[in-house]
Amino acid sequence: MKIQDLQVDHYRIPLPVVLSDSTHGDISHFALVVVRLRDAEGREGTGYTYTVGNIGGSAVRALIDDDLREAVVGEDSRRIERLWERMWWRLHFVGRGGLASFAMAAVDVALWDLAGKRAGEPLWRLLGGHDNRVRAYAGGIDLQFPLEQLLEQARGFVAGGFRAIKMKVGRDRMREDLERALAMRELLGPDFPLMADANMRWSVADAIRAARGLREADLVWLEEPVIPDDVAGHARVAVEGGVPIAAGENLHSVHEFEHLITHGRVAFPEPDLATLGGVTPWLKVARLAEARNLPVTSHGVHDLHVHLLAAVPNASFLEVHGFGLDRFIRQPLALHEGLAVAPDRPGHGVELEYEALAEHRQG
């Protein structure tokens, strides 16, 4: 069961349409870093992580190649908790999150993929097997879309089978955010789940003002209204703004989530396995949330997160993200009447089309 080899590749993936939010501006590409582990029995486990705008992609690849390779090659692939801790402490002095967690995520996902293939089980069942159907929402990255383009995108999402949608807020004029949210509510009707994501744009005072204005749009949640470090600010927005808050995609350790859940009044903890360090810490965050009677949601990498949400009893919504890999996956995520279906293929079941990816390879 020993790991015989590790291969890591970095790809610069173009988006079909330039997307935008209040923090990153226009986004034309993202980085994809892929790890392939091979064990002594010839099985291969695949893991991957990503970065917005391709920023840091080469650094993540270098961390894996230069520093994590030695931590896992030659080790027993079944001892995932031990290997995760080994990686964490190897990078601890320069990491404790950040790029270190992105790099660890790709390796950890590959280890879990190997575990599923070895057991002949899909990941969602291996990890707990609660329900292979998960409520999904379309995560629009659409801050600068003109209003009619925003509404047309929403119509397309509904036609494509989605029964929940998230839009971006955080425009220069807050009044425009409110007008756009109300236009979406009018289009979708009173019972259609609608979320809004500010991508950390506001001060606490502005976020409270925005939340109060957005009440009329009847949001499921307002996401990342303030910077992730301001836990007390999150609590103030939740209490004084009167809208449920989702947050966590910019947190990179279980310890940060514990603080947010305990003190931040977050209603929907939102771990992203690709930025948090992989499957192993994601499950710990989900259990932290469950212990506080909170639902857990996800951010990005929907082809992997569908397994994790399907595994746990406190799943809420799966984000189907704009940074999708459908063009490069043999069997993309299946959606049926608003529900994403976790596949029954062993491991996570994501088979990348490396020939299609080849032209985007870096280095």
Image: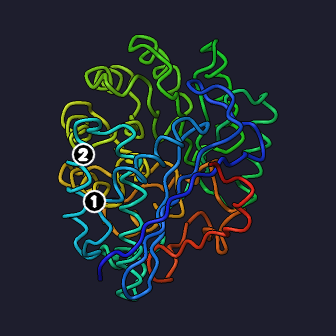
What crowding class fits label 1: few (fewer than 14 Cα within 10 Å), some (14-19), or many (20 or more)?
some
Q: Is residue 354 above or below residue 267?
A: below
The residue that appears at 41% across and 52% down in the rendered structure is 64
User: Which mark lies nearer to you, 2 or 1?
Assistant: 1
Residue for badge 2: 254
Quadrant occupied by the N terminus:
bottom left
Nearer-the-camera pick, 209 or 5: 5
Q: Secondary structure at mark 1?
A: helix
Residue 99, image x, y percentages = 40, 40
Verify CB contact (< 8 Å) between mark 2 and mark 1. no
Residue 71 disc label? 1
Quarter occupied by residue 29: top right
- Left or right: 91 as drawn, with respect to 271: left
- Left or right: 222 as drawn, with respect to 138: left
Residue 17, image x, y percentages = 77, 42
Identify residue type, mark 1.
Ala
Q: Is residue 326 above or below residue 298?
A: below
Residue 286, image x, y percentages = 28, 55
The residue that appears at 29% across and 74% down in the rendered structure is 77
Residue 271 disc label? none
Nearer-the-camera pick, 102 or 299: 102
Q: Is residue 236 above or below residue 268?
A: above
Q: Secondary structure at mark 2?
A: helix
Nearer-the-camera pick, 133 or 26: 26
Q: Is residue 335 above or below residue 219?
A: below
The residue that appears at 63% across and 19% down in the rendered structure is 171
